[in-house]
Image (tube, rainbow, N blue to C red):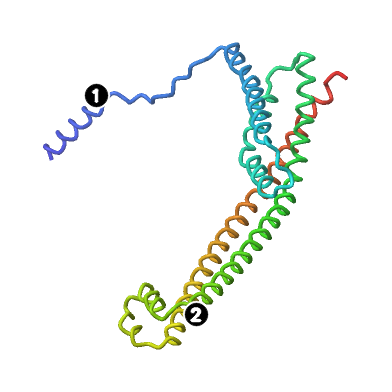
Amino acid sequence: MTLSKSSSKKRNSKNRNRKPKRSRTPRIIQVATEKLERSGKMLPSIGYFILVLTFLDYVFLLIPPRFLNPTWELNIIGHLVENVWAPLLGFALVFIRQQNGFRESELKLLSWLSRLMLLMAIIYFLSAPLIISNTIKIQQKSFSELKNQLETQKKQVAQFKKQLSQIPDRQLANYLRQRQSQQSSSTKSSSSNTLLQQAFERVEQEQIKSANQIRSAYQKQKFSLIKKSLKWCIGALFSGGIFLVFWRHTEWSRKTSPN
């Protein structure tokens, strides 16, 4: 009992000697409001710079123009949709302001930029049906190219069969040995009709294999085109909607600008 009392007394004395831990609070550093305002004034300049670079990108993108070319038009629209973040960021930085006063010239510029956002919204909305129509045109062209390729292949096979029927038996046997080395012993004793039939079967097998490869490549290209066009179509509609929202929220620049 005496030992337990002495040990408990020692523990209590140790606990009393321990200093309480101070809670560490994050240090808050105050920055002058003037410095923050000076940094905020950089944002519109960055926005104007982004808009100028975007405009130059659009100009060089359209040179040389190849209108009525569905592949070119689809790639142009895809580039506009995938890089829509640049004009959106530029417009956002230009119109985010903390001051209430504007120069008359800048207010005129902001009013025209607000109207430009409405034009951008219309362009992106109209590009969605253009994506669909160009996709259909490209798909029809690819299908016609597939048919022409298969027809050309059939004509070549028919011409090759005609040439095989006119060559001597020895050359026909050599041809079959090159194509089927495992049947070289049987081709020596085969008749001319049998050799010709074997050659025709070999040619037809190669034709079927080649045609399947062409169809498989066509299906892959078709799936890739549809997936890409669907992505760009949805992106164009969303981009047009965002530009329209920006245009509505910048109504103050159009109403307060001098005539």
* Amino acid type, residue under disc 1 in the picture: Asn
Foreground label between 1 and 2: 2
Res. 62 mark: none
Q: Is residue 229 above or below residue 185?
A: above
Farthest left residue in view: 3
Q: Is residue 32 above or below residue 182?
A: above
User: Going by the image, does 27 lie left or right of 233?
Assistant: left
User: Going by the image, does 168 lie left or right of 124?
Assistant: left
Which residue: 64% across, 19% down? Answer: 45
10 Å crowding of disc 1: few (<14), some (14-19), many (20+):
few
Question: Picture coordinates of residue 162 (x, y %)?
Answer: 53, 76
Which residue: 76% across, 45% down? Answer: 126
| Secondary element at tag 2 | loop
Which residue: 45% across, 79% down? Answer: 199
Q: Residue tagged by mark 2?
A: 165
Question: Picture coordinates of residue 74 (x, y %)?
Answer: 67, 47
Farthest right residue in view: 259
10 Å crowding of disc 2: few (<14), some (14-19), many (20+):
some
Quadrant showing the C terminus: top right
Q: Is residue 64 above or below residue 78?
A: above
User: 190 or 65, which is in the foreground?
Assistant: 190
Q: Earlier in the sequence, mark 1 or mark 2?
A: 1
Q: Residue tagged by mark 1?
A: 17
How far separated are the C-alphas under marks 1 and 2? Answer: 111 Å
Task: Assess whether mark 2 and mark 1 are in contact (beta carbons under 8 angstroms).
Answer: no
Q: Is residue 205 above or below residue 233?
A: below
- Res 38 → quadrant: top right
Question: Picture coordinates of residue 76 (x, y %)?
Answer: 66, 42
* Amino acid type, residue under disc 2 in the picture: Ser
Quadrant showing the N terminus: top left
